[in-house]
Amino acid sequence: MEKYKIVFLPSAEKELNAICEHVSLVLCAPTASNNFLIKLTECVENLVDFPFTGKKVEAPNLEFEFRRVLVDNYFVFYVVNEKLKTVTIMHVIYAKSDYLKNL
């Protein structure tokens, strides 16, 4: 089975950096921030071999077929392109937020 390439959108990288900064600096929990980043990295690396692991997002008017995986309190939203063999990380969003409006 061919492996997929992981691509982070710049906006997803920005969201991830903001989350880690908030947890580390505002909540004064740098270890928790680091642990979250490790878990997220492991989860995303798993998508290289199993890109359809995430739950399909059911919502009207989505431009792409989004999938999501939960890492701690955050959803990682991504799109699989079978033709290009890529998994594009689109967003990293707090799971208890109104995340559908950001997709």
Image (tube, rainbow, N blue to C red):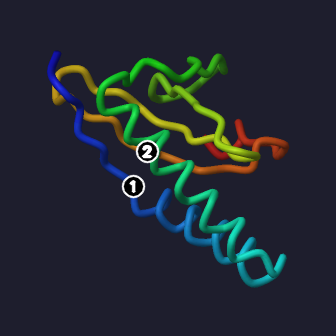
- Percent coordinates x, y for residue 87 in the rendering: 33, 35
Residue occupying image coordinates x 59% and y 24%: 61
- Percent coordinates x, y for residue 76 in the rendering: 57, 42
Front residue of 54 and 32:
32
Residue occupying image coordinates x 58% and y 19%: 55
Q: For the N terminus, give its image quadrant.
A: top left
Q: For the C terminus, give its image quadrant.
A: top right
**Residue 26 lies in quadrant:** bottom right
Q: Which mark is residue 85?
A: none
- Percent coordinates x, y for residue 74 in the rendering: 70, 46
Disc 2 secondary structure class: strand
Front residue of 13 and 60:
13
**Residue 83 lies in quadrant:** top left
Question: Does residue 54 appear left or right of residue 100 in this picture?
Answer: left
Q: How many marks?
A: 2
Q: Which mark is residue 89?
A: 2
Disc 1 secondary structure class: loop
Front residue of 68 and 45:
45
Q: Are marks 1 and 2 in contact (CB under 8 Å)?
A: yes
Measured along the vertical axis of the image, is residue 33 above or below residue 47? below
Q: Which residue is disc 1 drawn over?
A: 9
